[in-house]
Image: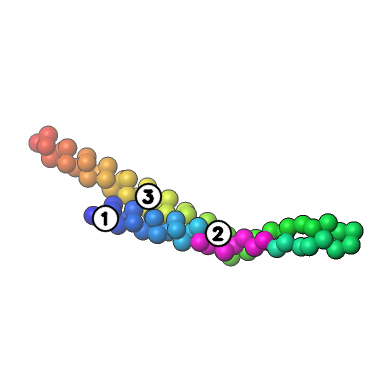
């Protein structure tokens, strides 16, 4: 049960991380002006990028925890059958 909850929370963290990452990228298009050609500039908003990285790190830790809980439960189950 705890592994399933950790997996769901990891999925929520990944979705939130993707949303934060998209909010952290700002693209501005500039039209040509005289001799200056048109160009596109991308600005990175550090707080959003940091939040995205943090959320994705938390998601990874939650997935590792879920795998460890499943492995621990399987080992405990097989140990009970051996007795």
Tell me the SS state at disc 3: helix
Among the 4 quarters of the image, the one containing residue 6: bottom left
Residue at 77 percent across and 57 percent down: it is: 39
Among the 4 quarters of the image, the one containing residue 82: top left
Residue 73 highlighted magenta (yes or no): no
Q: Give the dominant element type of the magenta stretch: helix, strand or loop.
A: helix
Q: Earlier in the sequence, mark 2 or mark 1?
A: 1
Tell me the SS state at disc 2: helix
The part of the chain drawn in magenta is 19-27
**Of residues 60 and 11, which is closer to you in this image?**
11
Q: Is residue 68 left or right of residue 80?
A: right
Kindly identify which residue carries mark 2. Answer: 21
**Of residues 27 and 8, which is closer to you in this image?**
27
- Image marks 3 and 2: residues in contact by CB distance under 8 Å: no
Q: Position of residue 44 (x, y in %)?
A: 65, 60
Asked if residue 19 shows in the view, the reply is yes
The tag on residue 2 is 1
Q: Alpha carbon of mark 3 to alpha carbon of mark 1: how far? A: 11 Å
Residue at 42 percent across and 54 percent down: it is: 59
Q: Position of residue 50 (x, y in %)?
A: 56, 60
Among the 4 quarters of the image, the one containing residue 35: bottom right
Q: Position of residue 62 (x, y in %)?
A: 38, 53
Q: Alpha carbon of mark 2 to alpha carbon of mark 1: how far? A: 28 Å
The tag on residue 63 is 3
- Image marks 2 and 1: residues in contact by CB distance under 8 Å: no
């Amino acid at each position: 049960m705890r592994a399933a909850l950790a997996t769901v929370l990891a999925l929520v963290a990944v979705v939130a991380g993707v949303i934060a990452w998209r909010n952290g990228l700002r693209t501005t298009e500039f039209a040509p002006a005289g001799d200056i050609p048109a160009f596109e500039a991308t600005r990175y908003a550090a707080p959003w990028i940091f939040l995205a990285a943090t959320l994705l790190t938390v998601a990874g830790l939650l997935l590792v925890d879920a795998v460890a809980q499943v492995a621990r439960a399987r080992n405990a189950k097989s140990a009970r059958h051996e007795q």
